Image: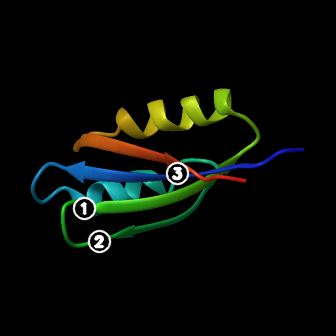
Amino acid sequence: MTVVIAYILLTTETGKEYEVLDHIKDVKSVTESRMVYGEFDVFLRFEVGDLAMMDDIVTQIRRIPGVRQTTTLVGSP
């Protein structure tokens, strides 16, 4: 089975970083998440079986209250 490894960089509403991180812990397939400093507020890594599953995860992340913007990076094999 091919594994798609992807990363999402999130920008959150001011002061919502920890709330967003709490919600991310409930998302299946997320293998790492942390608050970061700089242009983005939250970094996360996830693994899925295909691009359709990746789309589901990205959509789920975007629906979390407090998420303002996402940038998704798909790992190269």
Residue on which disc 2 sits: 36
SS class of the residue under badge 1? loop
Mark closest to the chain's N terminus, 1 or 2: 2
The amino acid sitting under disc 1 is Asp
Judge from the rendering whether residue 39 lies leftward or rightward of residue 25; answer left or right: left
Which numbered circle lies on residue 57? Answer: none
Mark 1–mark 3 distance (CA, rounded to whole Å): 18 Å
* Pointer 1 residue: 41
Q: Is the residue under label 2 in contact with that under label 1 (CB below 8 Å)? A: yes
Quadrant of residue 1 in the image?
Answer: top right
Above or below, comparing residue 5 to residue 63 in the picture: below
Image location (x, y in percent) of residue 42: 32, 61
The amino acid beneath tag 3 is Asp
Element type at mark 3? loop
In this image, 17 relative to 26: left or right? left
Which comes sooner in the sequence, label 2 or label 3? 3
The kind of residue tagged 2 is Val
Q: Position of residue 10 (x, y in %)?
A: 31, 51
Task: Residue under label 3, please give it.
Answer: 26
The colour scheme of the drawn protein is: rainbow
In the displayed structure image, the side of residue 13 where residue 7 appears, left or right: right
Point out the residue furthest to the left here.
Answer: 14
Foreground: 69 or 66?
69
Residue reaching furthest to the right? 1
Question: How busy is the neighbourhood of tag 3: few (under 14 within 10 Å), some, or many (20 plus)?
Answer: few
Q: How far apart in space, not on screen, are marks 2 and 3 (Cα)?
A: 19 Å
Q: Is residue 23 above or below residue 39?
A: above
Q: Residue at x 60, y 53 (%)?
A: 75
* Few, some or many residues within 10 Å of mark 1 (<14, 14–19, 20+): many
Residue 77 lies, in percent from the top left, at: 73, 53
